[in-house]
């Protein structure tokens, strides 16, 4: 992917379909307007142009670039952006994508697992593709985990020693070691705030629907007119991935949650 800073970008794209009040798309271009930050143009699945407003820091521009605009590039390529934190277990052959609603504790759990020897793949937006034999791959992302200060302190990290993700949001960025290349993806684990402590492996339509719910910015797909390609990709992934639902309505400790997750992955045998 090529990333370039430019002086200006258009207000609108000719013939574009609105995704929401700030995003619009054609089949191969996606324009993101962030008031007070700048504009981002994702093109043809291979190029991202960034035009920041006066006085906006590189950190703020990068924060937004690896979210909605990055998802646009991934959708343009016919691949899948998962909203998750992705890690590789110690000695494991397949990575685990941890997903769930905002506030479920994905990033905190990811940081705890890193402390137990898991290896970081990506956070927030996980690019998922298929290899030459049709097997799912997860690609390495920006090597940082965004943590709330309380979570950082719980992990023995001093928040004040870390850069802020964005001052008004309060999270800090914990830098980790980046994977050298893509890894096999074997599991998607959904942290469910509305269920008790049971762990369920999903199958059939339930697995497909659960996976679809974790796609990052799915509204972009319709605006691009790529529904058929997207559904084909989803169906192929759902046939191969193990999708788990972990109930956390009782708010388990991070240690308990790590133990439950590690046990289920070990039981699955990959």
Image: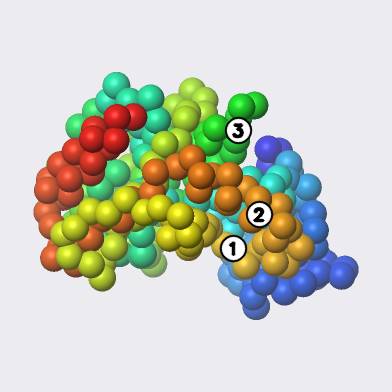
The residue indicated by pointer 2 is 230
Which residue is at 66% across, 54% downward?
230
Which residue is at 70% across, 66% downward?
222
The dot on residue 134 is 3
Which residue is at 73% across, 67% downward?
223
Q: Quadrant for the N terminus, please.
A: top right
Label 2 to label 3: alpha-carbon separation: 15 Å
Q: Nearer the viewer, mark 2 or mark 3?
A: 3
Q: Quadrant for the C terminus, please.
A: top left
Give the percent coordinates (x, y) of residue 243: 38, 49
Res 166 seen here: yes
The residue indicated by pointer 1 is 218
The dot on residue 169 is none
Pointers 1 and 2 in contact (C-beta within 8 Å): yes
Q: Residue furthest front?
A: 204
Label 1 to label 3: alpha-carbon separation: 22 Å
Among the two numbered marks 1 and 2 on one chain, the one whose residue lies closer to the N terminus: 1
Picture layout, residue 171 above or below residue 132: below
Label 1 to label 2: alpha-carbon separation: 9 Å
Among the two numbered marks 1 and 3 on one chain, the one whose residue lies closer to the N terminus: 3
Res 61 seen here: no
């Amino acid at each position: 992917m090529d990333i370039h800073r430019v002086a200006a970008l258009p207000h609108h794209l000719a013939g574009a379909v609105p995704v929401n009040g700030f995003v619009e798309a054609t089949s191969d271009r996606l324009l993101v307007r962030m008031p007070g930050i700048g504009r981002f143009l994702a093109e043809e699945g291979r190029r991202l142009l960034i035009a920041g407003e006066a006085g906006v820091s590189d950190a703020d521009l990068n924060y937004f670039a690896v979210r909605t605009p990055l998802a646009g590039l991934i959708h343009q390529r016919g691949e899948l952006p998962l909203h998750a934190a992705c890690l590789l277990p110690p000695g494991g052959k397949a990575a685990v994508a941890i997903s769930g609603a905002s506030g479920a504790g994905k990033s905190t759990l990811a940081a705890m697992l890193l402390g137990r020897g898991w290896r970081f793949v990506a956070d927030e937006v996980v690019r998922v593709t298929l290899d030459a034999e049709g097997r799912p791959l997860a690609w390495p992302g920006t090597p940082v985990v965004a943590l709330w200060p309380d979570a950082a302190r719980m992990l023995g990290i001093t928040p004040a020693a870390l850069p802020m993700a964005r001052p008004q949001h309060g999270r800090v960025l914990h830098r980790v070691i980046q994977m050298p290349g893509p890894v096999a993806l074997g599991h998607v684990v959904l942290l469910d705030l509305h269920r008790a402590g049971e762990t369920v492996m999903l199958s059939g339509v339930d697995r497909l629907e659960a996976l679809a719910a974790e796609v990052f910015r799915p509204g972009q797909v319709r605006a691009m007119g790529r529904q058929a390609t997207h559904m084909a990709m989803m169906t192929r992934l759902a046939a191969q991935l193990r999708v788990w639902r972990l109930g956390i309505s009782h708010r388990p400790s991070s240690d308990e949650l790590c133990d439950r997750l590690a046990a289920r992955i070990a039981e699955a045998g990959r």
